[in-house]
Amino acid sequence: MMTMQASKSATAIDEIDLDAPIFDPNAFRLNDEQAAIITTARGLGQTVFAGRAGTYDRDATFPTENYRDLHRAGLLGIAIPKRHGGLGADYQTYAVAAAEIGRYCGATALTWNMHVCSTLWSGPLADDLDMDASIRADHEQRRAVHYKRIVDDGAIYSQPFSEGGAAAAGGVAFGTEAKPVKGGWIVNGKKIFASLSGHADYYGVLCTEIAEGEKASRRNTLYLALPAKTAGISVVGDWDPLGMRGTVSRTLLFKDVFVAEDAALMPRGVYFQAAMRWPHMFLTLSPTYVGLAQAAYDFTVRYLRGEAPGTPPVKRRMYPTKQIAVAQMQIKLEQIKAIWFQAITEARANPTKEQVLRAYAAQYSAMEGANEIATLAIRTCGGQAMLKSLALERIYRDSRCGSLMLPWTAELCLDRIGREALYETGESDD
Ligand SMILES: Cc1cc2nc3c(=O)[nH]c(=O)nc-3n(C[C@H](O)[C@H](O)[C@H](O)COP(=O)(O)OP(=O)(O)OC[C@H]3O[C@@H](n4cnc5c(N)ncnc54)[C@H](O)[C@@H]3O)c2cc1C
């Protein structure tokens, strides 16, 4: 049987029995190196992050201490190539490790995703895309600067993308503008729901490069890492949401912010190319919710066995209704795991149409499924299980947020699957 978090010290990882992995390395054919990275994430999540999650949630504060631990464990650089001092994990390894973190602290996993994407997108993903040799050489030099800050200094990057209009859904160019000037750009604009605001060292801003007299175009999207302390950047607004409270996703304002050329996380045109050719880049918000689905299931099994810490040792497992509900939860969890693991394994440049449709379906399944399992968990465990002293009600609230994440919200996944299944590129009924 799985054990619960027991200690608050990162050194305790070796001293307690870890929960069984969500994805058993043998069953899912993960190699030893992948399994070792994922075990580190699971160990940190279970022994350290789980114990802190309730406080970050209650106070809606950023998990700063968890980030120090992630840095110490090398996990801030999980997707940074080994030659730059990182762990060199591929997309699949990162995704499974992130699911393990999400199992113990949703807000840490979700914000860690924003950070890791700055390295994943500028790293293994960019390596798959077309660039001429001199641009690739420049990119290699530039990303080395970002990677060194992360590996050596524990710098944290965020990914403000959403603006409250159609840009985050991919419909139009970002309204945040970067005007080219000598040695860099002047950035003006606004980002909403900017997780890690006030806590990241660099804001990895998606914006549109517009020279004097030009029109905004998605092709001219830039991905710039703005140092958080630069003049002209401010964090505004309250943060008191339903769930994912530790993400501290407040509003960021940019007023005439100068940023130097070396801030580019991707060369010109490469973000647009990535969005067209590497669609799984938008599936990276889902691992957190696979972890939350597992967490809701784990809680229910322990609770019904009378083994959930902080609750009396009362067994409820003998009732057929409970057994049926657990069976339904287990079936749902295995369905989510199966499609999601397949989709993360297929992440690459130029996926087939079938693989893209599967990625949307995997995102939908994880985001909606996590909340379905958490809902069933609350109903099945009963009133005493949804008290704020226990993790389940936080898991329930956090899991509700998955479907809202642009660009692949649950609604937009349905929209895309329906349209792309029925129409080939360029087809219309006119
Ligand atoms: C906890 C949390 C953390 C977040 N962190 C970040 C972050 O770090 N960085 C970041 O950039 N964003 C972040 N977001 C923002 C998130 O990705 C969405 O942008 C945000 O939830 C959109 O809210 P909205 O009310 O403006 O949505 P709206 O744009 O008003 O959309 C509402 C809904 O309408 C649907 N919709 C939107 N556009 C279309 C369309 N073109 N066609 C059909 N349907 C459409 C979608 O289903 C969407 O959910 C976070 C959100 C949450 C909840």
Image (cartoon, rainbow, N blue to C red):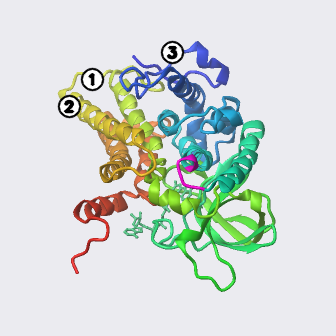
Q: Position of residue 255 (x, y in %)?
A: 74, 73
Instruction: Answer with left or right where residue 100 lies relative to residue 216.
Output: left
Quadrant of image for the C terminus: bottom left
Other-residue count near label 1 (Cα within 10 Å), few / some / many at <14 / 14–19 / ≥20: some
Q: Which residue is mark 2?
A: 324
Quadrant of image for the N terminus: top left
Instruction: Answer with left or right where residue 39 lies relative to residue 132.
Output: left
Q: Residue furthest top?
A: 15
Range of magenta residues: 126-131
Mark 1–mark 3 Cα distance, whole angstroms, equals: 24 Å
Q: Position of residue 407 (x, y in %)?
A: 45, 60
Tell me the tag on residue 17.
Answer: 3
- Label 1 secondary element: loop
Give the camera-side residue of 170 and 131: 131
Q: Quick one: label 2 or label 1, which is nearer the N terminus?
A: 1
Q: Quick one: label 3 or label 2, which is nearer the N terminus?
A: 3
Q: Which residue is mark 1?
A: 317
Q: Main secondary structure of the magenta part?
A: loop
**Magenta stretch contains residue 128:** yes
Q: In the image, which is nearer the foreground, mark 1 or mark 3?
A: 3
Q: Residue at x 29, y 62 (%)?
A: 420
Q: Residue at x 22, y 63 (%)?
A: 422
Q: Position of residue 45 (x, y in %)?
A: 55, 30
Q: In the image, which is nearer the foreground, mark 3 or mark 2?
A: 3
Q: Position of residue 206 (x, y in %)?
A: 60, 63
Q: Residue furthest front?
A: 133
What amino acid is labelled 1 in the image? Arg
Q: Is residue 101 visible?
A: yes
